[in-house]
Image (spheres, helix red, strand yellow):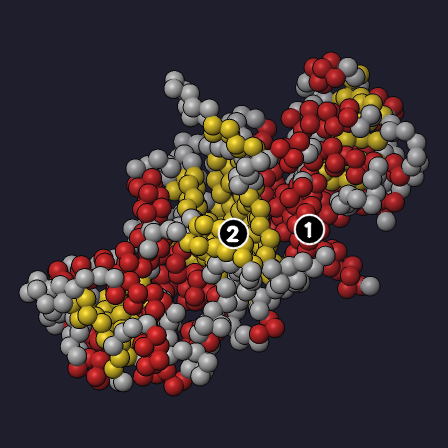
Amino acid sequence: MTPSGRPLKVAIASFAHVHASAYIRALQKMNGVELLASDPDHKSAPTRELRGRAFARRNGVEYAETYEDLFAWEPDAVIITSENSRHRELVERAAHAGVHILCEKPLATEVADGEAMIAACERAGSILMLAYPVRFSPAFRELKQLVDSGSLGIPLSVSGTNNGKVPLDSREWFVDPVAAGGGALVDHVVHCADLIDVLTEGEPAVKVYAVANQVLHADKRVAVETGGLVSIEYGSGLVASIDCSWSEPDTAPTWGGLTFQVTGSHGSAEIAPFASHVGGSGPDGQIYLGIGADLDELLLRTFLDAVRHSGKPTPGIRPSMIPQPDGLSGLRTLKIMDAARVSAQHGEPATV
Amino acid sequence: MSRTNGPLADAGAKPRLVGLIGAGRMGRAHMAAWGQLGASVIVFAHEGAAELAGRHGVRTASSMEQLLSRVDFVDIVTPSDTHAEFAVTAIEAGHDVVCEKPLALSTSSALAVQTAAELYGRTVFPAHVVRFTKPNIAAHRAIQKGRIGQVAVARFHRSTAAPFPGSWLSDDARSGGIVFDLMIHDLDQARWMCGAVDSVYAVRSRPVPGDASGICTVHATLTHASGAISQVTATWGPIGTQFFSSFSIAGDLGVIRHDSRQISELSIDIPDAGGSPRLVRRALAAAQHNPYLSELEAFLQLRPTLDPRVTCEDGVEAVRLAEAVSRAISSGVVTQLHDASQAEMAVR
């Protein structure tokens, strides 16, 4: 509900990203939220992918044929789950329409786009929040407290892994160099980079080295990198490594996972926010039933609380509540991803 | 190749007299293994020889010359900065050599050992013990059998307590520091699992103010001639840090992983009201397997068909990788490598 007591109107722009259905499911469980979705670019997707009105019907959500109709509905907030390359146009459009924004990660495919998006939202007074759910996990919050309390001593090193299946079967654009902006480096560096951003409270990276290859899924003729390893240096001297590879085999019982280890001068701690599960075997192989916290719900609640608190955007005025991760945070991780892409291409470290 | 000579030349003979040079931590591990293998040992060391020999009921040598004149082959377990010199001396005296890793603290010294071994027709066996641990053997075999297809992305992580301040291990000039002492295990593993290395990049964590033991983490990123990429992480933690090692190796057909912390063949929980909580988990089979024994057994070629081999060249390449990591840390740039085994392949 909004302060005036009417339900909050939340728009879903595009079904391109696989997370759209998860957000819809989480929002449908919440009281005081009305949903309307639109996916006019669905015609650019392969016909075997469930998109557009059919997707809306399957997910039980109201559907608008065009973005004009979607924004004419005057939503309070929009969740942008388009291809990465379309984030900018949709964010600018939403900002112009006076709507608060939750944008799927990464912020954009190019740094200049990200900067333009932040500027557009500042002008419009719109919230620009990035969809990084892992920082909301209870395990990560405990880790953050451990670091903040000094229990680990001085943080020296981070080792992050974010491995998944190749997102080819569900949504082909993920392996399109233009629509996605790249492959595994674009898809999976940013989650771990975002966690480091929280730990360091926004310390910018200074130097990034990345290597990438296309050995995994070579049989599927994927045009982007499927394997990637990244090494990051921060100004404080913190060093980090991230494995962003799509190395979870197609036969694995779950999508993949994320691990994040912090080593400090007094000790180390590691989290695996997606590790809790009930396991077993069935006729189709292994069974893996995730039982961890619903991170999407925690992320969405944070966003919607800020939307309610801030009220309708006023051009030139900062929203009264700016939820994290905000656009600037998203820009920092985008810059790391971009530097990783440059480094992998040139075989040399890249400055951020 | 020299490795077909040596103790194998008179294969079939009973295990013989080992000249153990050094009497530190690795000396104790090797001494115990030699005993189990039924070999006799003579110890020579600047410190601790009498104590170690006394405990195991073996003799000591009063000088290097005396040792070399009596034994059938030599096992070097001294501080790392002396490995290469002892190895060359032993080779020149006509002995085969087991040498604790690292073979040397520089590629040039390691190559000098290799050159001497070739000249004198002797075997040099760099004791890269991780090649003889059960998880790594299992993983290597699975890769060889094609169970994960072509190797694409590999990660190796090894963490243990930093050496006590004042010990030779904490002296970078003597031990080579974390890269030559700890990380070299997994640099060798990366090469063993993924093949010859093309390039190396590495970063090291900042120094900890007031710390004399060398607490740090190093991340190395490697590219391999096979097209694979790998990342090796080594950590020296504060005193009391529990040892662990882990790896994850992904290929185009599958992935294999191991983490020494995730073991629960036996779990014991005995709450102690007065003390610290006691939760013990152990992998019995792995704990009972002694990789040092397997390693030295492989040297004796008691089970020639079963055990993985380490050649002198492997030892040289591990040192070359460690040197490249050190150079990358200090220079901040990528080091291109030309693995000798690769060059050899190209010649063929």
Kindly identify the residue that appears in the image at 66 percent across and 24 percent down: B24
Is there CB contact under 8 Å for labels 2 and 1? no
Q: Where B327 falls versus A70 (above or below)?
A: above
Q: Residue B80, percent across and down?
A: 66, 34
Q: Residues within 10 Å of mark 1 (few under 14, many from 20)?
A: some
Q: Residue furthest front?
A: A283
| Residue where numbered disc 1 is placed | B140
- Residue B178 appears in the picture as rendered: no
B131 sits to left or right of B164: right
Instruction: Name the residue type under label 2.
Output: Gly
Kindly identify the residue that appears in the image at 6 percent across and 65 percent down: A4
Q: Residue A229, percent across and down?
A: 51, 58
Q: Does dot 1 land on a helix, a strand or a loop?
A: helix
Q: Does dot 2 land on a helix, a strand or a loop?
A: strand
Instruction: Name the residue type under label 1.
Output: His
Q: Where A332 falls versus B15 (above or below)?
A: below
Residue nearest the viewer, comparing A32 with A193: A32
